[in-house]
Image (cartoon, helix red, strand yellow):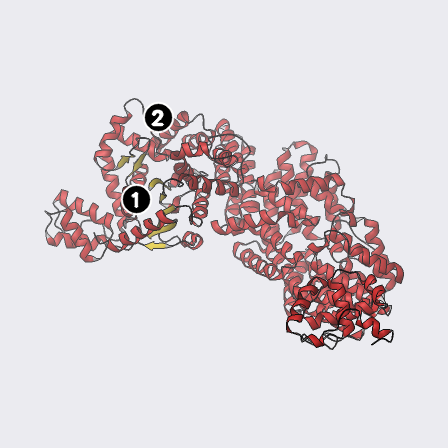
Amino acid sequence: MGRANELAELAVFLDETAKDGAALILTGEPGVGKTALLNATTDRAAATGIRVIRGGGFEYESDTRFAGLHQLVYPLGAELALLREPARDVLEVALGFGTGPAPADIAVLNAALLLFAEAAHEQPLLLVVDDLHVLDRASWCVMSFVARRTGGHRIGVLAALRTGIPELTGHLRLPELPVAPLADVDAIRLLSHRFTSLPRRVITKVADQAQGNPLALLEFGALASASGTTSSGLVAPGTGPAREVQALYAARVTRLPIATRELLLLAALDGSGEVGVLEEAGGAEWLDALVPAERDHLVHATADGHTVHFRHPLVRSAVVEEATLERRRAAHRRLAEVLAGQPERRADHLSMATTTPDETVAQIVETGARERLRRGDILGAVARLRRAAALSADRSNGRRRLAYAAYIGASVAGHLELSHQLMQELDDPGAGRSLTASAAAGYLSLMTDGDAETAHKLLVEAIDARTAGTGAEQEDLSTAIFTLLLVCHYSGRPERWAALWQLVATLPNTSASSPISLVRILQDVGSVPDELLHDLDEQLARLGEVTEADVVIRTALAASYLDRLSGCRQWLTRAIDDARDTGTVGGALPTLVMSALDDLYAGRWDAAQAAATEVISAGRDTGYHLITRVGHYIAALVAAHRGDSDACATHCWMLFEWAESRGLGRLGDWAHLALARDALGSSEFESAYEHASAITPPGELPPYNLEALWTAFDLVEAALYSGRPQEALKHAAAMRDARVDRISPRLALLTTAMTAMTSSPPEATRLFDVALTLPGIEQWPFEVARTRLAYGEHLRRQSLRAEARAQLSAAREHFERLGAAPWAARATAELRATGMTRAGGVRAGDALTPQELEVAELAAAGMPTKQIAARLVISPRTVSTHLYRVFPKLGISSRAALRDALTDRRRVTPAHEVCPPGLTVFRQHGFE
């Protein structure tokens, strides 16, 4: 009653599902009738030939990865068996049906969509999910992914979501159908229809107390009808309908036979509803025990008899809350015995069943936690590590487990508040910290307060204790090394690397993304062996198969050190999208930073600016204040390139403030780099030299200082144009000696260009030509444009004006496309110095001279400049001059566009104005 509008909209939804596909979310308070509308819709769908599969969230499974997806895939066993590899393997491994390497989240999302699409091929498919708000996060992501891609597949996604959870509704971005409380007239109609013996006065009072909540109406009405109550005090005042209804369910549960209550408790704690589990855990009489609950409409079995569902989530909550602690633990023990073949589920039940420290159980739970972490279930891993710590009989093992939970909570999950809480739970945190505890404390100090000094002291002491013979596990040592690397890198002080390098020098070679390799890369980029470069390239090619978030972060970090960030692009985007979908942006801050840097290097400056702004905002909101400064660095560089000096200075001030107050030298180097770049764009070469040389003196490339490499071109250019040719010469030589040109196309381009700028004129011309023909440099458009600008300046000084114009025009075009206004202005000023105005004094549409037309026709036919010169008996320089006057007249910027431009011009040019090819040559020799 009172749901005609909602049912009409749901009928339209079903029609859209059957024709093409649709998604809809029912939203409303508990008990408002969302489940009833789901039931009515599924009945209508089945009657119209739509296949229906139901699932739902369960608070006791909310931290079990893909528990909800398991409910939806389980009935599709036949379709899953027919699904092609690798999609079938992906789902089987993710859901525990099979074994193998953990699939990436994006692979699970795509495999689930393929399975549902296959199931809907012959018959439309409706996926119904109740209690979406307590669905496990991984399954929630799958439903969100599938719901946005139903079009063309005849898949319907219908879910119910409790109101008051804005972080979910905001991230779903799906059509919603709000389910409001019933109007007073409909509430009274419902009560009058259902409880005919109740007096009107009681019905009115029940309706008033239920506040239009249908579940409360029915339960309060049943209570009044059964007790014959006619007084005004049906329920305690000051409580909401949902809480009151749960209390009524609890009363009904307590009236059931003890065997029935025990069976319901097993079903509630298991959460799967699988009849096989209940049969084995409930004993031979389990079916008889279920009957009273079915008669009282507290549970119902599916038509196929494979699954048992609670009538409403409040029934399940009432069952659990009614049970004593000992009864719940006994139920968990029975379920653990039944689920012996499912290690993760067994570990969960064992952890809840154990009341005293038990190292065996703690180890089982920790193993399950690490397996969840390997599969990408970070928050699930943290929760289980915390439980393992509580169950640890060995105090040191308990502290280690808790510390590891705190570390991954902060470094991978992005939950600083949780990590701080876990660190506080460590008793006597200052005494005898383990490697993992020191890593967690150091990471938190660095990222939240920028306290590199404290973090460095903690980690070095812990590592020294380990090398003295305490014998920590290799994984704990790796965690400590990575954290100490971050501390040393941000501090920017060479002396802080000594202890770390002393340790790393004694350790064997490992993969390119390992903390040990990262330290060796930073120590001397130019000496990185080819084997490590190849290993990193192979890891980047396989990055889509990696589920461990910390490995993805370290791989991207290695790629950023060695100019290979573009190889991470797809996976960085995936990680960021997943974080935005799930509302865990704090954990995605490192990948968001890497994505912003990739955008910056690739010339996507709008995207880089947007990402930098998001890093600043998210870092501030989540407490990762150091990462906020990384956002300021990226924003400062974008502003410097675009000529926004005020914005650049503002961002740099934020960097200098932390660099000086906290001794974080790297942040100061970032600010100097951005200010040097800003000064160069404005031709303020003295200022640029001061900032660039503040990072490193000319002729030196200190270890562990990436900024010295990234600012090398700036320092050479600033030194040359500020009257310091010897300093420029020394720095270019240092770059060559460092052998960084073998690492990446960008470093090869910059090293060759710097060498050209400091060489004799003939050698400079040769080297600039070499630089601009290096393979792969198109990935770095800003560096290519700067090289062309430097080449054009060199050619102009040699009075090779036509050749200079070619390079300067190309540089200006690149700068304008990037939005680098001051750099484009520098190129324009150089062009004027060659005697060329903005377009050489010509405009688009101006008539071509006879010789210009002839040169253009031959160039359009593909003839090289030297052959054109020989054909027309003119110099190659004259050919270039003609072409660069032709381009603006035709409104083009390259030879590739000549043919089409000339064809278009012939259509609109009178025949008598066209000079036939070859006529110019006859005229030059006196023939008319």
Q: Classify residue 410 as left or right of residue 241.
A: right
Query: Which comes sooner in the sequence, label 2 or label 1?
Result: 1
| Secondary structure beneath label 2 | helix
| Residue 601 screen position, x and y as percent | 67, 56
For badge 1, the amino acid type reads Ala
Badge 2 amino acid: Ala
Q: Mark 2 touching mark 1, by CB under 8 A? A: no
How far is disc 2 from disc 1 in space, using C-alphas? 35 Å
Looking at the image, how many numbered discs can be counted on the residues?
2
Question: Disc 2 marks which residue?
Answer: 281
- Would you name the residue on which mark 1 appears? 45
Depth order, front residue of 887/613: 887
Location of residue 907 with respect to 27 vertically, above or below: below
Q: Quadrant of residue 81?
A: top left
Residue 417: % across, % down: 51, 49
Q: Position of residue 613 (x, y in %)?
A: 57, 60
Q: Decide if residue 835 is on the left or right side of residue 124.
A: right
Examine the rendered structure and indicate whether residue 446 appears above or below residue 359: below
The x, y position of residue 645, in whole percent, is 67, 69
SS type, badge 1? helix
Question: Which of 923 and 18 lies nearest the eye of the viewer?
Answer: 923
Label 2 neighbourhood size at 10 Å, few (<14), some (14-19), many (20+)?
many
- Please report the residue visible at 39 percent of the width from the left and 46 percent of the height from the top: 154
| Label number found at residue 923 | none
Q: Answer yes or no: is residue 619 visible.
A: yes
Give the mark toward the camera: 2 or 1. Answer: 1
Residue 458 in sight in this render: no
Image quadrant containing the C terminus: bottom right
